Amino acid sequence: MDVAGDLVFLGGASRGLEIVDVSDPTNPVMVSSTSLSGLGITLELVDDVCYITDHDSSYTSIEAYDVSNPVSPQYLGGYLVYNVDFFNLHISDNVLYASDHGSSGDVFILDIENPSAIEKLAQFDTGGTAYGTYVQDSIAYFTDYDKGLLLVDISDLNNPVLIESHDDGGAGQGVFVVGEFIYFANRNDGLEILRYS
């Protein structure tokens, strides 16, 4: 889910990409519903482009839609790898980070400068099953369901390099960074607040 002004963008599962007007929060109004080939799961909105994961039975693609006219979203392009199950998405500086919680368990790093021609820059092996991502400056913070938290140098996007990891039992899920503090959601231990400098 993402929000822009009075519009809420939803991955509506079998209903695809849904856009809802909440200018009157007591009376939300459906603006549009765009069908996908599978299930609309997670999405990220950047300016007037919405990136949504489209989950089919054997793969999950990432599709880009122009939503400048929310009544009629227009398909721009997509990225598909068979036997990959893209889940959480994170976008920073025209780069999309997509966790595969399927066959590889890796994080795909994709160039989305041109949404009509999404290209892979790199694929980072977290060692388990990738889950969430947060990017600040030249460091990507990857959570991994089996390996905890990984800090990765992405100054060269074509060659990400592991800096450090934190694993006290795995089950890494969400992550957010403010300054030198890392807020790390660990399914086994709850919220962990870490400091990195």
Image (cartoon, rainbow, N blue to C red):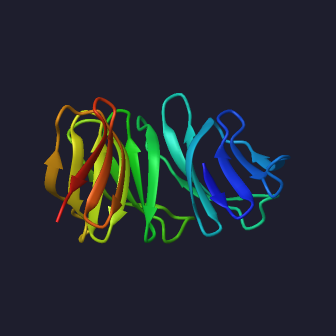
Residue 35, above or below 89 = above
Residue 176, above or below 139 = above
Residue 19, horizontal then vertical, whole percent: 74, 51
Q: Residue furthest left?
A: 164
Residue 9, horizontal then vertical, whole percent: 67, 52
Which residue is found at the position 61% from the left and 58% from the top? 50
> Number of marks in the image?
0
Which residue is found at the position 23% from the left and 33% from the top? 170
137 or 40: nearer the viewer: 137
24 or 145: nearer the viewer: 24
Residue 69, above or below 19 = below
Looking at the rendered image, the quarter that the C terminus falls into is bottom left
89 or 137: nearer the viewer: 137
Give the side of residue 43 with respect to residue 181, left or right.
Answer: right
Which residue is found at the position 19% from the left and 60% from the top? 196
Give the side of residue 123 with respect to residue 79, left or right.
Answer: left
Give the side of residue 152 with respect to residue 78, left or right.
Answer: left
Which residue is found at the position 46% from the left and 51% from the top? 89
Residue 14, horizontal then vertical, whole percent: 68, 33
Residue 93, horizontal then vertical, whole percent: 43, 71
Residue 37, above or below 90 = above
